[in-house]
Amino acid sequence: MNKIMKMLSVSKVQHSIALLLAAIVMIYPILFRESTYIQLIICTLGIYIIVNTGFDILFGYSGQISIGQAGFYAIGAYFSAIFSKAGIPVLISILLAAMIAAAVGFILAIPCSKLVHHFLSIVTIGFGEIVRLLALNGPTKLTGGANGIGGIPPVNLFGLKLTSNISYLYFVLALVILFLIIKNRIVNSRVGRAMLAIKCNPEASESFGMKLSKYKSMAFTAAAFYAGIGGALYAHLVRFISPESFSGEQSSMFLVMILVGGMGTFYGPVIGSFLIILVTEFLQTFGTYQMLIYGALIIFVLFVMPNGIAGTLRNKYYHLLNKLPERVSKQSKEAK
Amino acid sequence: MFFQLLIGGLAVGCIYALIGLGYSLIYSASGLMSFVQGEIFMLGAYVAYTIYVGLHIPFLIAVLIAILIMFVFGMLLERGMISPLLRRGSKQIHIVLATIGLSIFLKNFAMIIWGSDVKNFPSALGEDPIRMGNVSISPQQIAIMAVTFICMVLLHFFMNKTKLGTSLRAAAQDPMAAGVVGINVSLTVGMAWALAAVLSAIAGILLAPIYGVYPKMGAILSTKGFAAAVLGGYGNMYGAIIGGLIFGVVETMAAGYIASSFKDIISFVVLILVLFIMPHGILKVKADD
């Protein structure tokens, strides 16, 4: 085991593993050209990874809970659908919708940056419900009420229409990679470190001259933007949206994904989204027991690994690294 | 029209007050937030329904058995899930998530056991409304207000006059000092959760004859109950009552005069505004309460 960990700790090996994984991901859809069902699931997975990556900035790094991410997701989906049906190019409408979601996130962050824990969770629940109810009962000419919006145009990439699942899959994949990199840049920047500091000790960070509400609302805006992009991608994937897809259950699903994967880590949202999609697809065979097992699973995860899979693995990794004799001696040499 | 809406609003407000009281009890005893209150509300109604309609046991006895079951349930919830999680070093956020998980579990548990259709809970008082001028009040609405009033008076005396209630307040104020003078703190915390469960279950049983019993009946009511507690002053018993009544009346008036489809939107907007403008609530939460 130690040998394996030693191998893995060499960055060359890490890079080649990453390349291998990327290659598998790229080639897989070509090999399984026929199974559109799996392609659809992978597309959804990509969308969830984007949403959860953004959510992780808010929840994992900034420490603010939100049980209303489906609200931003819905804003992205609805606005992108409405804009693209009005004739605006799809790529621009996706971007516009995400920006509207981000703007709403910024406005919501103004009262939210003062609130903690259960107050914040109840406001975000309320926000998610307001968005869903507005989509259901609001301007029905725009949102279609309970019937939703159908016939949403597919993504048009410089004259290339992405109608098939495979081409859409690559489009989503490219965006996933892009947004993972952006998140990594945000998190490792001064802003990201400030968010972490505020999460750990708000009083101390404030006394160092950080404006709490500024960083908190930045996290909210970023998460809303990511969710908006995810929602817009979802709308152009299934090309039909209705208020049902954006219920409170969707919000708690995002939360569970982050929790299971491990919040505040790079791989956490990816692992979490993957596992929960796998589990929900697997649980489909249980029919009515699906959500029952799902609920029990959440409690189980909290008991067994409260830091999530990525968090637990990271702890184990450092634990093993500390046991390696060479590394210790190297450090002590440096110390001398 | 106005008085009709006022009576309806007060009746709904009483339900919010009962649920909000549960939130306040849990918060003052353990500083936590539970998302299962809505499901306990639903479960209480289902248990009473099963005993009353299914087993043909007289209404009052059925309700008492249901309340007893929910008391045990609340105690088990704290003993079996919350305090083990806390002992493992879980943070508040983990408790929130655990209760969300449990609420998903219970909702689907009820769906499997009782089915997802709306069960008709016959009112023990009959359906004939009482007419007073041009205002008609259903007996169930009177029952809701009367029972809520009795619950509140009982709770007030329990908290202020009995030894258990006093120790509950003491444990809420300073757990360590309370432990030093010989109060069983973990028992009193469990007691608070159990009482919160009982209050929610009573609310569920009271509302069941009006809206029927179905697995999702508690989902939105629990959020509004919480809103009521926040409006009045979170953690304050009397605040939850005032907040609940105000919230119920405002919501019903909005539904009556503006549009019923916007009822929930308006109540959530009110909630967000209240949290933004006066996070301490109407009664400022005092340390010595």
Image: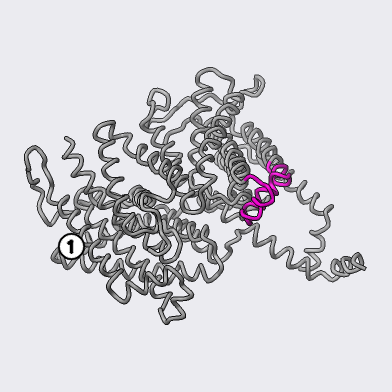
Q: Quadrant of residue B154?
A: bottom left
Magenta stretch bounds: A183-211
- Residue A243, placed above or below residue B153: above
**Quadrant housing the N terminus of chain A:** bottom right
Q: Of residues A306 and B222, which is closer to you in this image?
A: B222
In the image, taking residue B118 as reference, residue A174 lies left or right, namely: right
Can you see residue B219? Answer: no
In magenta stretch: residue B26? no
Q: Is residue A302 left or right of residue B58?
A: right
Q: Secondary structure at mark 1?
A: helix
| Count of residue discs | 1
Task: Residue at 61%, 53% (x, y): give it.
Answer: A202
Give the image location of residue B23, x and y in percent: 37, 58
Amino acid, disc 1: Tyr
Residue at 44 percent of width and 36 percent of height: A131
Residue B248 position within the rendered picture, expressed as x and y whole percent measured from the top left: 28, 45
Which residue in the structure is indicated by mark 1? B52
Residue beneath the point at 77% across and 46% down = A19
Quadrant of the frame with the C terminus of chain A: bottom right
Q: Position of residue B249 (x, y in %)?
A: 26, 43
Q: Is residue A205 magenta?
A: yes
User: Which secondary structure dominates the residues rendered in magenta?
Assistant: helix
Residue A162: tell me if it is visible. yes
Query: In this view of the protein, which residue sits in the foreground, B275 or A287?
Result: B275
Viewer-side residue, B262 vs A45: B262
Residue at mark 1: chain: B
Residue A263 relative to residue A284: left or right: right
Q: Residue B236's spot in the image, x, y percent?
A: 36, 58
Q: Residues within 10 Å of mark 1 (few under 14, many from 20)?
A: many
The furthest residue to the top: A87
- Note whether B107 is above or below B3 in the view shown: below
Asked which quadrant contains residue B149, the reply is: bottom left
